[in-house]
Image (tube, rainbow, N blue to C red):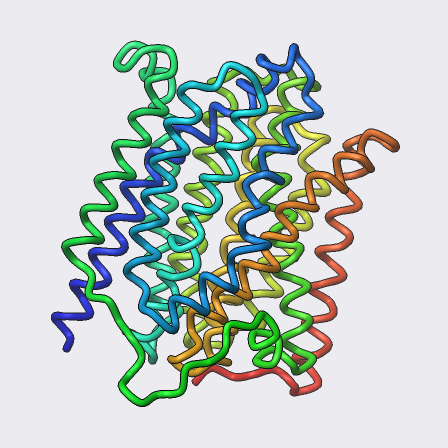
Amino acid sequence: MSESRLKTFIGITSAAAISMLGVGIVASGLPARVITLSGGDASLVGLLASSFALPYIFLQVPFGNLSDRYGFKPFLLFGYFLSAVSGIIFYFANSSMPIFIGRAVQGAGEIPVWATAPAIISIAYPNNKGKMIGIYTAAVYIMLSVGPLLVPSMPDIFGERGGFLFFSSLCFLAFLIVFFTQKNRRPEPGSKKDSLEIKKAFELLSDVPVRIVLLGIFLYGCGQGLLFSIAPGWLVTARQYGGMDIGILFSAYYLFIAGAQFFYGPLSDRFGREIFMILGLICSALSWALFPYTGKLFATLLLGISAGSLGGFFVSSMAFLNEKAPDSLKGTISGSYYLFWGMGYFLGPIMWGVFGSMVGMQKSFFAFSAFLIMAAATICIIWRKGSGVRPV
């Protein structure tokens, strides 16, 4: 059993890490490319995050519930197939609209990578799920951090848009790894098959502490949407960041996220989930409030800290929610997590982008910081009252 679960873990981790190398290349180049194709209009950059998040809103819980019923492997394979297709769409795009369509396809493809894998890991490692989820996501973000550093060499190796085809080839390789290393886990014969209803997820998440955590997850999605669209767009137009600067910024994001998740996971296993969810939200809030008023180096550092802090919140809150569900509904619970994350990732860039155009982006970033502080304070109050769920 130990050897089998190790093979499962290594297989899904290596496949995700390989595909995310390509995602790092693609994601760091898309904001500047959209600005170029739209004639210098930076306001459209936020749609990169919103179009990516749409599939998370509509497909996460259905995908999760279907994977509980029919097994995880087919959905992992389908996800990597869609990711490969998105790279081909990016390659042939000559305007901003196909890029937004490609981002939506890519978002649908990444659903199993981000939601199904933690469910598989939680089942395989019930007593140290936080640690193993942390290792998985740390490996993913380490490879994401390498991708942007390769962007300058892509035109010389593959041509002007060849990095998109390189991304597709990596996703196809990940498809093969999953195909040959994963067994399809199905419900036991005679076990109850839960109905395909989104309300099933909400029935699992009915207590007040979990609903407060869902608010934090929504803000986590908002934060990631801002980090990967609005913030770099603002830095390009207001601070004259170049392509290499944005690549370094994205690498900082991924490195800080990898480091935070590597440490937050096992620590939350030992000391409880709530304290690290609170810590992640507070550290991110402070970074958002300060970065607009600093120079290039410190702005990059602070945004990296914000990304890492949200990454720490992720691994703690994902383990928190997975403790709420039986094995037969791990996919559903992970899907519900990314439903709320997707709503935040979709709405956050739109809301704060509009607000920023009205009052200024610096004030918009400060307002987002205040929301993170309020969410952290609410989780802290609930936790201190003794209502929080302790680790199993």
Outermost residue on the bottom side: it is: 190
- Position of residue 79 relative to residue 314, above or below, is above
Q: Nearer the viewer, residue 178 or 310?
A: 178
Q: Quadrant of residue 158?
A: top left
- Position of residue 342 relative to residue 205, above or below, is above
Tell me the residue at 67%/35% (across/down): 291
- Position of residue 356 relative to residue 338, above or below, is above
- Position of residue 5 relative to residue 217, above or below, is below
Is 272 on the left-hand or right-hand side of 282? left
| Image position, residue 16 (x, y; %) | 31, 48
Q: Nearer the viewer, residue 260 or 346?
A: 346
Tell me the residue at 33%/45% (across/down): 80
| Image position, residue 259 (x, y; %) | 41, 50
Outermost residue on the right side: it is: 359
Q: Nearer the viewer, residue 181 or 88?
A: 88
Dividing the image into 4 quarters, which one contains the C terminus? bottom left
* Number of marks in the rendered image: 0
Q: Nearer the viewer, residue 306 or 117?
A: 117
Is 221 on the left-hand or right-hand side of 131? right
Q: Quadrant of residue 288?
A: top right
Tell me the residue at 59%/31% (across/down): 298
Is 378 on the left-hand or right-hand side of 257? right
Dividing the image into 4 quarters, which one contains the N terminus? bottom left
| Image position, residue 84 (x, y; %) | 34, 36
| Image position, residue 335 (x, y; %) | 50, 64
Outermost residue on the left side: it is: 3
Q: Quadrant of residue 233?
A: top right
